[in-house]
Image (tube, grey):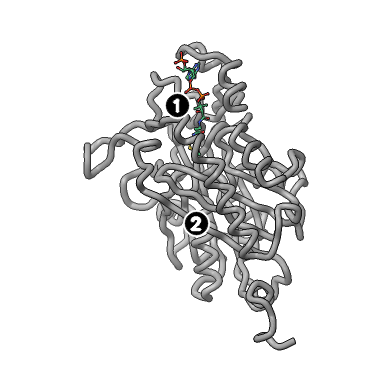
Amino acid sequence: MTAMGMGTTLRNQLNKRRSVVRGVGACLPERVATNADLAKIIDTSDDWIVQRTGIRQRHIAGPGETTSTLATKAAERALAAAGLTAADIDLIIVATSTPDYTFPATATQVQAALGITRGVAFDVQAVCSGFVFAVATADKFLASGSHQRALVIGAETFSRILDWEDRTTCVLFGDGAGAIVLEAREDSGAAGVIGSRLRSDGRHRAKLYVDGGPSTTQTVGKLRMSGREVFKHAVGMVTDVMTDVFEDTGTTAADLDWFVPHQANERIIDASAAKLGIPLNKIVKTVALHGNTSAASIPLALSVAVDDGRIQPGQLVMIEAMGGGFTWGAALIRW
Ligand code: ACO
C-alpha cells in the first residue's frame, strides 16, 4: 500500500518522529500533614475529607523547599532513571502555577541548578492541566526536530497560596514535583506520545482562581474555588478530550493499559473512568497520599506506577487533567 492509500492515523503513526519516555522521577517534601493534623487547626474531619475527596494526607513544603528545589530533585531522579546526565538535555519545560518568583521562569532556575547552559528552559502555566500542556508542548518541539531531549516537569507548592482559614479549599491541596525525560526518536516503533488534545475556556475564570497578582494587586494572592462548579464541569471536559484523543489515534478506552488522571478528587476520577468504561483496576490513584498537587499530580502518579512495576514498556497510558482557566487536556503515550 502506498502512503497515499493509508489512513491518516496509520500514516502518522508510522512516519512520525516520536517523543519517547526514557525515565520518570519524583520528589515530595518530607513533612506530611494528615487529615487529623488539619482537623487540629480548622473545623474539619478525616471522615468529611475522605468521603468527599479520597484524600488522607498531603505533603507540605518546609523551610528552604521551593517549587524549583522540588523540581530539580525530581529532574535529577528522572535523569538517573533514564541513564542520562544533565548534559543530554536541550529543552526544559516546567509546568507550575506556584513559581519561586514572578520571574524568571522556574524552569531557568532548574536549568541553572542542573548546570545546563545550552538549549532552552521555560514555564507553562495551565494550573492543574499544566503537565499535560507541557507534555504536548515538548512533544511538538521534539517532533519538529528542533530539540532532542526534554525534561518535562510538573512542580508546585500550593500550600503557599492556600488560605489556611478556608476549610473548603485548604484540605484539598499538597506540594510536590514529578518529572519525565522525553527523547525524540525516528525508530521508536510504536512507542512515544501518540496523541494529545488541549483546550481552554477563559469564561470560567471566577470558578477557580488566585485573588492576587503582579498587575492587579501586587500581591501573590490566595486560591479561591467554587468546588461544586468545578466538579460540575470536570467530568464532561476531561472525558471529551480523551474521546478526541481516542478518535485521533484510532484507539478506544478498551485499548488502555493504564489511566493516569490528574489527582484532584477520587470522585471525579472514578466518574470520568466510569463514563468511558475504564475499569477501576486500570486507574492509577495517588490522591489519598498526595492530595491535589496541581501540575505535579500526574508525573507523581506516573512515578509511583513505574516504580512499583505497574507501568511497563509497550503499554498504553492515558493522562488527563482539568484546572483553573478552565484549561483541560489529555495525552496518550505508548510507554
Ligand atoms: N470539612 C468539613 N466540612 C466542610 C469542609 C471541610 N473541609 N469544606 C466544606 N465543608 C462543608 C460546607 O461548609 C458545607 O456545609 P453546609 O452544608 O453546612 O453549608 C458542606 O460541607 C458541603 O459543602 P459543599 O461545598 O457543598 O461540598 P461538596 O460535596 O461539593 O464537596 C468539594 C466539596 C470536595 C470541594 C467538591 O465540590 C469537589 O470535589 N469539587 C471539585 C473541586 C476540585 O477538586 N478542585 C480541585 C482543583 S481543580 C482541579 O484540580 C480539577
Residue in the image at 52% along x and 13% along y: 39
- Of marks 1 and 2, the one in the foreground: 2
For this rendering, which residue is in front, 312 or 74?
A: 312
Q: Which residue is mark 2?
A: 198
Does residue 56 appear to the left or right of 224 in the view shown?
right
Up-down: is 250 above or below 10?
Answer: above
Residue in the image at 75% along x and 53% along y: 254
Residue in the image at 51% along x and 14% along y: 44
Does residue 80 appear to the left or right of 229 in the view shown?
right
Secondary structure state at the residue bearing disc 1:
helix
Q: Amino acid at mark 2?
A: Leu
Up-down: is 20 above or below 330?
Answer: below
Up-down: is 166 above or below 185?
Answer: above
Quarter of the rendering occupied by the N terminus? bottom right
Count residues near mark 1 (Cα–Cα under 10 Å), then give few for <14, some for 14-19, many for 20+.
Answer: some
> Which label was assigned to residue 320?
none
Q: Which residue is mark 1?
A: 169
Q: Position of residue 198 (x, y in %)?
A: 49, 56
Q: Does the residue at mark 1 contact the one at mark 2 (Cβ under 8 Å)?
A: no
Label 1 C-beta lies within 8 Å of the nearest ligand 1 atom: yes
